Image (spheres, rainbow, N blue to C red):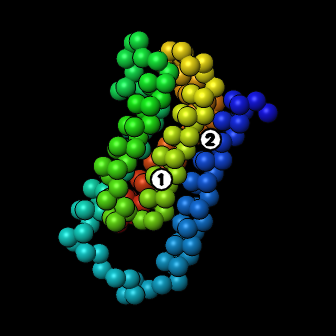
Amino acid sequence: MDVTNFLYVAVAAGAIAIVYPTIKDLFKKNKSKDTATQESQPPVNAAVLPLQLQAYERMALYVDRITPQSLIGRIYQHGLSAVDMQMTMVQSIKAEYEHNVTQQIYVSAMAWEAVKTLKEQTISVINQVAVQLPPDAPALELNKQILEVFLQAGESPAELTSQIINAEAKRLMK
């Protein structure tokens, strides 16, 4: 198995790692909702709901900003080396994560885990692709190969994570 195939498998495995626990938890929650009565559910705190929705909005924005397409669009400058581009993308992902880390208290553990997994997987793919390039490769080559990996992997992990975040935010508004 060559490195490119390994990267495709890694992206697919990451997507499965994000989706499987989420779907399993959703089925458990729906089953428990069906058996529980409305009176047994605690009332939603009106002061916390706006903070929760804002946290889900910030997580959705973070997920969008760390997609390879978004990162490349914001960071790429003509003349950058692949190594510089790699370091800048990874720094950007980590800095934005650290900026949003406190939002985990307002989102579900499942949503937060999906965001963390996406962050780690995106960094991993960037680093794995960068290692395969010669040290003097231009950033454009790194960008092209990263986009190829994510495009050929099928449904993107970022898209799956966004779906989780959106579904949970909508559930809060019911």
Of labels 2 and 1, earlier in sequence is: 2
What residue did someone put label 2 on?
11
Residue at 44% across / 25% down in the picture? Answer: 85
Q: Is residue 9 above or below residue 53?
A: above
Q: Is residue 17 above or below residue 64?
A: below
Q: Left or right: 98 with respect to 18?
A: left
Residue at 49% across / 43% down in the picture? Answer: 158
* Quadrant hosting residue 157: top right
- Image quadrant containing the C terminus: bottom left
Mark 1, secondary structure of its residue: helix
10 or 80, nearer to the observer = 80
Outermost residue toward the right?
A: 1
Q: Left or right: 98 with respect to 132?
A: left
Q: Position of residue 100 (x, y in %)?
A: 32, 52
Q: Crowding at label 2, few (<14), some or many (≥20) Cα neighbours within 10 Å?
A: many
Gap in angstroms between the C-alphas marked 2 and 1: 14 Å
Residue at 38% across / 83% down in the picture? Answer: 41
Q: Left or right: 91 with respect to 44?
A: right
Outermost residue toward the left?
A: 47
Badge 1 amino acid? Lys
Q: Position of residue 120 (x, y in %)?
A: 52, 47
Residue 22 got which mark?
A: none
Res. 15 in view? yes
Outermost residue toward the front?
A: 135
Q: Crowding at label 1, few (<14), some or many (≥20) Cα neighbours within 10 Å?
A: some
Residue at 35% across / 55% down in the picture? Answer: 101
- Image quadrant containing the N terminus: top right
* Quadrant hosting residue 132: top right
Q: Position of residue 69 (x, y in %)?
A: 45, 29
What residue did someone put label 1 on?
116
38 or 92, nearer to the observer = 92
Badge 2 amino acid? Val
